[in-house]
């Protein structure tokens, strides 16, 4: 942003940022030099910044605002719960109505046989809980050596020590001596970036077979679980080739290990189904949730646990794990109201039947743009690959094309995220067809501006 702000308050807030605020995943010198954009308000699919710019939020906050911004019912639910019982813990043989009602409602929408919920404050804590629970599960079954968790390169599972270790982001592992022992990674099913000469279907099989190879390398007697996002979100909206999940299911059926679906992004309607696992017909033993659970209005995450796992751990004494805010009553009340809105307004049905097919069709029209090498997506998730040469899938190396495009988007009233040279979107589920038109029109304009920069 230039120093010629219209609003002097922006400069004051940026000074506070410079002097006091440590933002996540940020280069602090860059934040000091440039200053953050200050987002002050949200309504529907739009946010406003402190300069008064109205911006279509193609990322739903950070994959969160499923029902959109400005839903007063959620604010009312929080206020009512704060008046009634703002906090009580769920330790030591206590509970409160909102957490119990929420656990029941989640069991209703979760895949069959997934009837138990452990609540956390975030997705990362959900995955920490998962790691401890699956090791506990195998110990209860008399197989304490089954500890290793297999994850995927470029998967994202959070930023706590376990979350970052489970994730396959090399730049995260480089800080803090990660991954911790007992976590190993296999290649991701990212055909556009890594498929080489293979067809997408061949590559999907190859990527799935890496799971079997890793199980055999580690020894099935040492493997506790495999964790994966149904569609990788932060890694770049990586939709696996059609052969991938069926082959993974085949391998999982062969070996006695647990399957964990990280549904933090795919859950609560993003694919048009309640969970990404439903979309693919996968049957996980555990599912991590967060984000869309409350539409991000208040922090909450959790781990949905199958009867199979619960039946083993329930008779084995204390599970020595939990957080002060596990099942926080205000968060639970907001989540309940959020799920009520998703259900009663038939938001998933609309996504599935109308808006997601429309978004996917309109996004694919961008394929005729010289910069666009692939458009992919499912439901309200989309990715646009920026390339120099479509046929060979060659990138503009070292140009930071994704960040250039992202800058143009912000300056033209659209939030799209860049993961390398992959532009990604995950708008609120309530986005209308007219708003999708606006999103795609703005995206095309920003692709044009990016191409001009590259040619200029
Ligand atoms: N699992 C998945 C699949 C996620 O996407 C987490 C776990 C961790 O959740 P918490 O609530 O602890 O952040 C996430 C979070 C990005 C980005 O750059 C994505 C996330 C977080 C921060 C940035 O797209 N996802």
Image (spheres, rainbow, N blue to C red):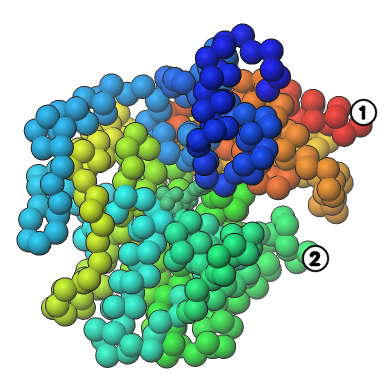
Residue 117, how many percent across, how many down?
A: 23, 58
Location of residue 404 with respect to 114 vertically, above or below: above
Q: Is residue 186 left or right of residue 109?
A: right
Q: CA distance from mark 1 to mark 2?
A: 33 Å
Is residue 51 shown to the viewer in this render? yes
Location of residue 140 with respect to 380 vertically, above or below: below
Q: Tell us which disc is closer to us: 1 or 2.
A: 1
Residue 437, how many percent across, how many down?
A: 59, 22
Q: Is residue 421 left or right of residue 361?
A: right
Is residue 441 shown to the viewer in this render? no
Element carrying mark 2: loop
Decide if ligand 1 comes within 8 Å of the CB at mark 2. Answer: no
What numbered label is drawn on residue 430?
A: none
Q: Residues within 10 Å of mark 1 (few under 14, many from 20)?
A: few
- Which residue sits at x=71%, y=19%? 2
Name the image quarter holding residue 374: top right
Residue 98, how many percent across, how many down?
A: 14, 43
- Which residue sits at x=21%, y=60%? 115
The quarter in which the C terminus is drawn is: top right
Name the image quarter holding residue 338: top left
* Residue at the spot of label 1: 456
The answer to which of marks 1 and 2 sits earlier in the sequence is 2
Q: Is residue 155 left or right of residue 115?
A: right
* Residue at the spot of label 2: 197
Element carrying mark 1: loop
Q: Residue lying farthest right? A: 456
Residue 362, how many percent across, how many down?
A: 63, 30
């Amino acid at each position: 942003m230039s120093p010629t702000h219209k609003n002097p308050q922006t400069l004051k807030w940026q000074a506070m940022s410079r002097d006091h605020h440590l933002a996540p995943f940020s280069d602090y010198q860059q934040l000091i030099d440039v200053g953050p954009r200050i987002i002050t308000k949200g309504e529907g699919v739009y946010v406003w910044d402190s300069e008064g710019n109205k911006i279509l939020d193609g990322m739903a906050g950070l994959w969160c605002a499923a029902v959109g911004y400005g839903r007063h019912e959620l604010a009312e639910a929080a206020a009512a719960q704060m008046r009634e019982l703002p906090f009580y813990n769920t330790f030591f043989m206590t509970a409160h109505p909102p957490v119990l009602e929420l656990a029941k409602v989640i069991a209703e929408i979760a895949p069959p046989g997934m009837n138990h919920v452990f609540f956390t404050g975030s997705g990362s804590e959900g995955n920490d809980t998962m790691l401890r629970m699956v090791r506990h599960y195998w110990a209860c079954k008399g197989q304490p050596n089954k500890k290793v968790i297999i994850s995927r390169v470029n998967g994202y599972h959070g930023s706590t020590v376990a979350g970052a270790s489970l994730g396959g982001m090399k730049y995260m592992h480089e800080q803090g001596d990660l991954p911790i022992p007992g976590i190993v990674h296999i290649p991701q099913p990212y055909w556009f970036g890594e498929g080489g000469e293979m067809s997408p279907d061949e590559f999907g099989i190859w990527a799935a077979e890496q799971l079997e190879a890793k199980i055999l390398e580690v020894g099935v007697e040492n493997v506790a679980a495999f964790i994966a996002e149904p569609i990788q979100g932060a890694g770049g909206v990586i939709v696996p080739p059609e052969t991938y999940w069926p082959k993974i299911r085949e391998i999982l059926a062969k070996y006695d290990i647990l399957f964990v679906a990280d549904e933090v992004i795919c859950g609560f309607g993003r694919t048009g189904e309640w969970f990404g696992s439903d979309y693919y017909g996968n049957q996980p033993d555990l599912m991590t949730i967060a984000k869309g659970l409350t539409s991000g209005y208040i922090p909450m995450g959790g781990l949905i646990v199958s009867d199979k796992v619960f039946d083993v751990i329930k008779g084995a004494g204390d599970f020595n794990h939990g957080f002060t805010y596990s099942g926080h009553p205000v968060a639970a009340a907001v989540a309940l109201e959020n799920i009520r809105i998703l259900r009663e307004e038939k938001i998933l049905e609309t996504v599935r039947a109308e808006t997601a097919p429309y978004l996917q069709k309109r996004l694919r029209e961008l394929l005729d743009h010289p910069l666009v090498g692939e458009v992919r997506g499912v439901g309200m998730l989309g990715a646009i690959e920026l390339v120099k040469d479509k046929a060979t899938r060659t990138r503009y190396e070292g140009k930071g094309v994704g960040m250039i495009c992202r800058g143009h988007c912000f300056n033209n009233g659209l939030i799209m995220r860049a993961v390398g040279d992959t532009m990604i979107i995950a708008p609120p589920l309530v986005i209308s067809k007219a708003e999708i038109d606006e999103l795609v029109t703005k995206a095309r304009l920003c692709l044009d501006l990016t191409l001009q920069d590259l040619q200029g």
